[in-house]
Image (cartoon, helix red, strand yellow):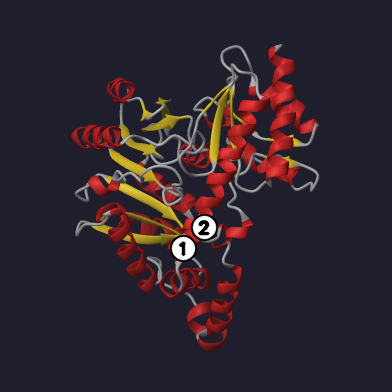
């Protein structure tokens, strides 16, 4: 039988990162590709105790249907934490618990974007968000990244040059894939541009609490009066990604539509993971675990950069993140990271070529993303050395 797929899905491609994960399942493979948090940061013993108690003492609550908005006590706890840690939340905002930050992005895109509408994205940007926007027939308009975040002059030009600009998607803190953090000045400028133009900002912040060098900057949402910014957060990088618990806070009118869209999608986020997140948040020192995680990533990041500067050709540039999970490298014009990726994969070293994160995924890209969170120091060194040898062969020096 010949299947005729919907227009919205027929040209969609699977995430290259997920395909790379399949290769990385080989225990001999050194994976510098994924975005997984380090397993040693999972509070598995504490979560096991919580789960046992919940299933013995509150089985109906844990195993029955819940409300679409999310477990009320968890919503209250998240709102209190956002107010305390980030200065986020006004009377004009509402909050929904979602099945991971990805669902928050997808639901908000579904509620805002018509086919043919424009959404502005950083370039490079997170593949999961780009594919969500593509799935609704939106036009992606890329804005180049600078060392301190999105190029604001280019943003103004893109807004002026495109019709039906509905939203701006940004990861201002420890951006995926670049690791770049947007400056405080640019955050204020971005908010002012969007508010004046009547464009919604979709702020994605899964890595914000994993700052390990320098000061933590205010979120864009903390500047908002409740009219302009939808903020997506997640427990995936600070607790455990397998729980699939995230949240969105934004203007009540938008969150109300997100709630309806979620009812259609999956009814509600599973109750047991929500309860685990709530009980851990309120009964244990989550901040201490986050500090432990950030310290681990600081070491891994610094060590990977040390290896990059030792083994890579001098002309390969790299970002120097102050948090998060990623380093962005660039060979410069005339080179294709996909070619390097194929050669390294044969040597059992995998990473993500930069074209994956671009508006035009089919155009050659000289950049690539490296992840440092899950490999040991020994494997980081070995992987970077193999990658460096390949780069030298291809670049001729």
Disc 1 to disc 2, C-alpha distance: 6 Å
Q: Quadrant of the C terminus?
A: top right
- The reply to whether discs 1 and 2 touch (Cβ–Cβ < 8 Å) is yes
Residue 280 shows in the view: yes
In the rendered image, which quarter is residue 84 located in?
bottom left
Q: Residue at x 74, y 36 (%)?
A: 382
Where 302 sits versus 164, above or below?
Answer: below
Q: Mark 1 packing: few (<14 Cα in 10 Å), some, or many (20+)?
A: few
The location of residue 30, given as percent across then percent down, is 73, 41
Residue 235 shows in the view: no
In the rendered image, which quarter is residue 53 located in?
bottom right
The reply, left or right, for residue 365 in relation to residue 98 is right
Q: How many discs mark residues in the rendered view?
A: 2
Q: Mark 2 packing: few (<14 Cα in 10 Å), some, or many (20+)?
A: some
Disc marking residue 91: none
Q: In terms of depth relative to the viewer, which is nearer, 57 or 139? A: 57
Where 109 sits versus 72, above or below?
Answer: above
Q: Residue at x 50, y 62 (%)?
A: 289
Q: In terms of depth relative to the viewer, which is nearer, 139 or 187? A: 187
Q: Residue at x 37, y 65 (%)?
A: 69
The location of residue 170, given as percent across then percent down, is 39, 38
Helix, strand or loop at label 2? It is: helix
In the rendered image, which quarter is residue 371 located in?
top right
The location of residue 24, given as percent across then percent down, is 73, 44
Q: Which residue is mark 2?
A: 292
Helix, strand or loop at label 1? It is: helix
Q: Quadrant of the N terminus?
A: top right
The reply, left or right, for residue 284 in relation to residue 352 is left
Q: In terms of depth relative to the viewer, which is nearer, 303 or 12? A: 303
Q: Which residue is mark 1?
A: 288
Q: In terms of depth relative to the viewer, which is nearer, 267 or 61? A: 61
Where 235 sits versus 45, above or below?
Answer: above
């Amino acid at each position: 039988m010949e299947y005729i797929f919907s227009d919205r899905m027929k040209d969609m491609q699977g995430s290259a990162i997920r395909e790379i994960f399949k290769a990385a399942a080989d225990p001999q493979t050194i994976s510098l590709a994924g975005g997984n948090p380090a397993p040693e940061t999972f509070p598995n013993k504490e979560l096991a105790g919580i789960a046992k108690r919940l299933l013995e003492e509150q089985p109906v609550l844990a195993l029955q249907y819940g409300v679409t908005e999310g477990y009320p006590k968890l919503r209250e706890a998240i709102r209190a934490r956002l107010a305390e840690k980030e200065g986020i939340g006004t009377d004009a905002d509402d909050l929904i618990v979602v099945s991971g930050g990805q669902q928050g992005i997808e639901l908000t895109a579904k509620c805002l974007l018509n086919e043919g509408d424009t959404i502005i994205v950083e370039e490079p940007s997170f593949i999961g968000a780009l594919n969500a926007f593509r799935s609704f027939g939106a036009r992606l308009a890329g804005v180049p990244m600078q060392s301190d975040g999105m190029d604001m002059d280019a943003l103004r030009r893109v807004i002026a040059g495109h019709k039906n600009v509905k939203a701006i998607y940004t990861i201002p803190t420890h951006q995926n894939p670049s690791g770049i953090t947007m400056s405080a000045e640019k955050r204020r400028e971005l908010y002012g541009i969007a508010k004046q133009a009547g464009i919604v900002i979709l702020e994605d912040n899964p890595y914000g609490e994993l700052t390990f060098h320098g000061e933590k900057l205010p979120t864009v949402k903390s500047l908002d009066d409740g009219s302009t910014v939808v903020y997506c957060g997640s427990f995936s990088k600070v607790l455990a990604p397998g729980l699939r618990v995230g949240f969105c806070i934004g203007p009540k009118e938008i969150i109300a539509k997100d709630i309806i869209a979620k009812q259609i999608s999956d009814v509600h986020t599973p109750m047991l993971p929500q309860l685990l997140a709530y009980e851990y948040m309120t009964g244990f020192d989550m901040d201490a675990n986050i500090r432990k995680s950030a310290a681990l990533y600081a070491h891994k990041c610094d060590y990977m950069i040390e290896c990059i500067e030792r083994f890579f050709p001098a002309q390969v540039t790299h970002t120097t993140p102050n948090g998060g999970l990623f380093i962005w490298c660039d060979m410069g014009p005339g080179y294709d990271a996909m070619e390097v990726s194929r050669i390294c994969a044969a040597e059992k070293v995998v990473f993500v070529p930069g074209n994956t994160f671009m508006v035009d995924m089919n155009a050659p890209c000289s950049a690539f993303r490296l992840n440092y969170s899950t490999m040991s120091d020994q494997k980081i060194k070995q992987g970077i050395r193999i990658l460096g040898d390949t780069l030298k062969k291809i670049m001729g020096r």
